[in-house]
Image (cartoon, rainbow, N blue to C red):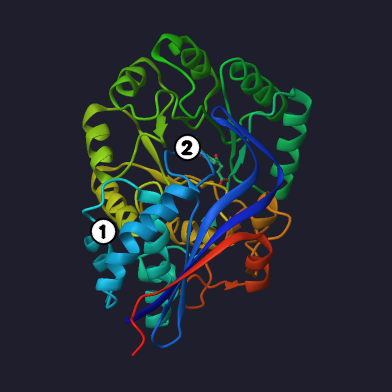
Amino acid sequence: MELKSIRLYHMVMELREYFETSFGGLKKRHCVLVAIEDSTGIIGWGEAPVDDGPWYSYETVDTTLYIYRKFIIPILMKNPHINKPEDFVKLVSRIRGYRMAKAGIEYALWDLYAKYLKKPLYRVIGGVRDRILSGVSIGVIGKMDLLLKLIGVYLERGYRRIKIKIAPGWDIEPVRMIRKEYGYIPLQVDANAAYTLDQASVFKQLDKYDLLMIEQPLYYEDLYMHSILQSMIETPICLDESIRGLHDVMTGHKLGSFKIINVKPVRVGGLLETIRINDYSIRNNIPLWIGGMLETGIGRAFQVAAATLPAIKYPNDISESSRYYKEDIVEPPWILGKDGTIKPLEKPGIGVEVLEDKIGKYSIKQYKYNLTKPI
Ligand code: OSB
Ligand code: MG
């Protein structure tokens, strides 16, 4: 593939409802979209789902645009001939961190590569299923009646698992009430690092409620304290923030820091690292699922593809487009089937068409760089 140009869009998408977590609330979803065009006119799309502030991750829209402009785009200008996404991963391996930024461009190259091969993305990465299980993640709502009502709506809609965000003061009681109202539905909680080991009694109490897992209870860079907590409770710990890539998977596995991993392909640097984690997890019997960052329909396509990998054993944080946005920027939008699943598309690449007018509507800044000098 001979890369010709790259376009970047700073998007501000309007969420349907306010999404509150232990690290803050979101009303609008920022992200950076990437469009790479090759010399034959094929366009590959990618998304770095970075926020406008360093809340979930230290990466933001501005750090992403900076890393692109200052380091990654100059590397692509020197190396516009890319055979496969792995070439790009090698080229940027000298850059430490900034995994979401790298993933945004790696994604676009995967889309381009799959379109070039005329194959659907999930087939190109080694996916093994034609439907993926969809779960829903509910923010810290704070009002019990509203939470219970919402869960009823999502169960009715067909979602295969409910995840609620927890924070100190909103943890045991909502779980108790959900069990009382809905019985033993597939249920899990996500603390987004809001607790310390001194608060282990909260998790011991949660042990009674037969949760599928407890996601990221402790500090966002920790593996050691989680291994201690895991030895104190029965419920599997699932790590999200703490796992930056395969290296952390291996360390955490040796330490016993988790039993399950939430893999967000963007958090680990892209689909290639996701495939490596998949392969290690298959060999070591670690169950995975794919997490989300309220992606647009573009990022969602990559989550869906990743969720077809063989090590995925739990429902994913991949809901349908309309659960997040008033309108999505792709056609068709991602839709939940009656059985609570989403189908990867069979068209080449990400399989969805990107609606340029919607990109125009929701982008507040646009940049274009030529990668090959005009003759
Ligand atoms: O911790 O999984 C998380 C959203 C933004 C940032 C972090 C998280 C989340 C979610 C939503 O839980 C998952 C989704 O996209 O549906
Ligand atoms: Mg999480």
Q: Is 243 situated above or below 268? A: above
What numbered label is drawn on residue 177? none
User: Seen from this angle, which residue lies furthest bottom?
Assistant: 375
Quadrant for residue 101, please give it. bottom left
The quarter of the rendered structure image containing the N terminus is bottom left
Task: Please say whether residue 44 is visible from this viewpoint.
Answer: yes
Q: Are marks 2 and 1 in contact (CB under 8 Å)?
A: no
Mark 2 residue type: Pro
Front in this rendered view, residue 194 or 205 = 194
13 lies above or below 194: below
- Give the image location of residue 225, x and y in percent: 32, 20
Circle 1 packing at 10 Å, graded few (<14), some (14-19), many (20+), is some
Which residue is pictured at 30% across the width and 69% down the height?
76
Tag 2 residue:
54
Which residue does the image show at 41% across and 21% down from the upper left? 234
Q: Quadrant of residue 255?
A: top left
Position of the C terminus by quadrant = bottom left
**Residue marked by disc 1:** 92
Residue 131 at least partly seen: no
Say which of 206 and 24 sits in front.
24
Q: Is residue 209 left or right of residue 227?
A: right
Above or below, comparing residue 318 to residue 182 in the picture: below
Depth check, front residue: 284 or 268 = 268
Identify which amino acid the numbered label 1 is placed on. Answer: Val
